[in-house]
Image: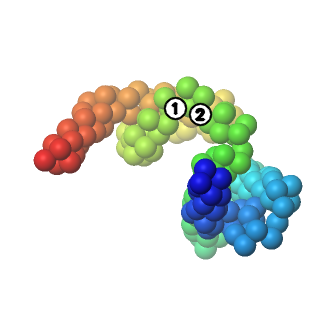
Amino acid sequence: MGSEMCIRDRREGLLGNAFSDRVAGSVDVRGGHNGTARVMASRKMSTLLCAFAAVVMLLTAFGTYGLYQSLPSSWGDAQNVAYISFSRLGWAVALSAIGYVCFTKRAPLTNAVLSWWPFQLWGKLAFGIYVIHPLLMTALYYGETRPIAFSDAWYAAAFTTNLLWASALALCLWLFVEKPSANVVALIFAKCVGD
């Protein structure tokens, strides 16, 4: 009885994860692969997904490096719109690939780095930073009356200033809006489920 239960649970586990395992190429639900082949295919797919994500994210971040060193840029409006559109899509797909390999525990090193406590703190503020930074940049740069002298030092100072201000404002947003709202929602759901 105990061994039958173990076999049934194992089969249910395999069938329950059939979609994710098929996508990762690690398991044949009919049992056609042996254990070593599954592990090797899983490692290869995880490595490919991580490499794909790294390449796409680097291309998104540095794809236009050098393009704006001389003005006007050699790109037209259509090329700029295409880059901005596809870079957003590429970033989302690459982030999803990293999430997939972390959630399925196929990238323990990546998962360990991203689970480090300082990244968890920044993770709680990430959406607030994303929402606040355009408003902050508009206030900082449209309020200037003197021309901006673009240089590497200016970019570094502007990035650091924007990051720190956006983080501070996102922390306030999290403390005074997001966290209290989450507490109220949890309280409402607890009352609804408890009734």
Mark 2 Cα shell of 10 Å, populated few (<14), some (14-19), many (≥20): few
Residue visible at 16% across and 48% down in the picture: 192
* Residue 195 image offset from top left, x and y in percent: 13, 47
Residue visible at 55% across and 26% down in the picture: 117
Q: Nearer the viewer, residue 66 or 159?
A: 159
Image position of 97 (left or right of 32): left
The mark that comes first in sequence, 2 or 1, is 2
Whether the residues at callouts 2 and 1 have beta carbons within 8 Å, the answer is: yes
Q: Residue furthest front?
A: 1
* Residue 174 image offset from top left, x and y in percent: 34, 33
- Amino acid of disc 1: Gln
Disc 1 marks which residue? 120
In the displayed structure, 47 sits above or below 148; it is below
Colouring method of the image: rainbow
Disc 2 marks which residue? 115
In the displayed structure, 82 sits above or below 171; it is below
Image position of 27 (left or right of 140): right
